[in-house]
Amino acid sequence: QVQLVESGGGLVQAGGSLRLSCAASGSIFSINRMGWYRQAPGKQRELVATITPGGSANYADTVRSRFTISRDNAKNTVYLQVNSLKPEDTAVYYCNADKAFPTYRDYLDNRYLEVWGQGTLVTVSS
């Protein structure tokens, strides 16, 4: 079983910064793309940013110049540095692993799990 645990959310004033972390634990051989999504009250969950094991990143247009995603493959951890926060960034931020392979056998057989974290709340006050 693979689990993702987020941390780093909180209350911050507009213009402030936070660093979100997401650590994967459990039986893990490798994880493909990891990413951050967010869901604001009354809205659908949306992509924020994703990153491949090689470090290739993809961002939503709304956060491209303000947020930076990174990962430490050795620690199975992904980070999201969020700067210049705006009230509209207020949301629950969820970590995602699109393909988590628990063992090498699973990797060879292309058996994987898609895993979501429980979310961390970011509240930006104006």
Image (spheres, rainbow, N blue to C red):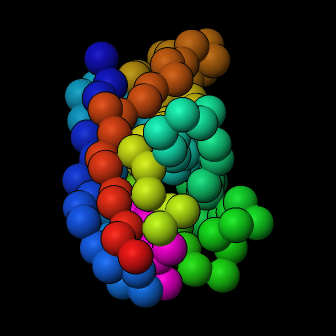
Magenta stretch: includes residue 80 = yes
Q: Which residues are magenta?
A: 79-86
Q: Which image quarter: residue 117? A: top left
Magenta stretch: includes residue 26 = no
Instruction: Name the spot of residue 64 as percent of width and height, x first.
Output: 68, 73
Instruction: Name the spot of residue 32 as percent of width and height, x first.
Output: 57, 41
- Does residue 53 appear left or right of residue 118 in this picture? right
Q: Residue at x 64, y 47 (%)?
A: 47
Q: Which image quarter: residue 19? A: bottom left
Q: Residue at x 52, y 23 (%)?
A: 114
Above or below — where is 88 with respect to 18? above
Instruction: Name the spot of residue 40 as percent of width and height, x first.
Output: 50, 44
Q: Which image quarter: residue 112? A: top right
Q: Would residue 34 be seen by someone viewing this image from the given angle?
A: no
Above or below — where is 22 with respect to 96? below
Q: Quadrant of the C terminus?
A: bottom left
Above or below — where is 104 with respect to 75? above
Above or below — where is 105 with respect to 47? above
Instruction: Name the spot of residue 89 as percent of width and height, x first.
Output: 50, 62
Nearest the camera: 10 or 94?
10
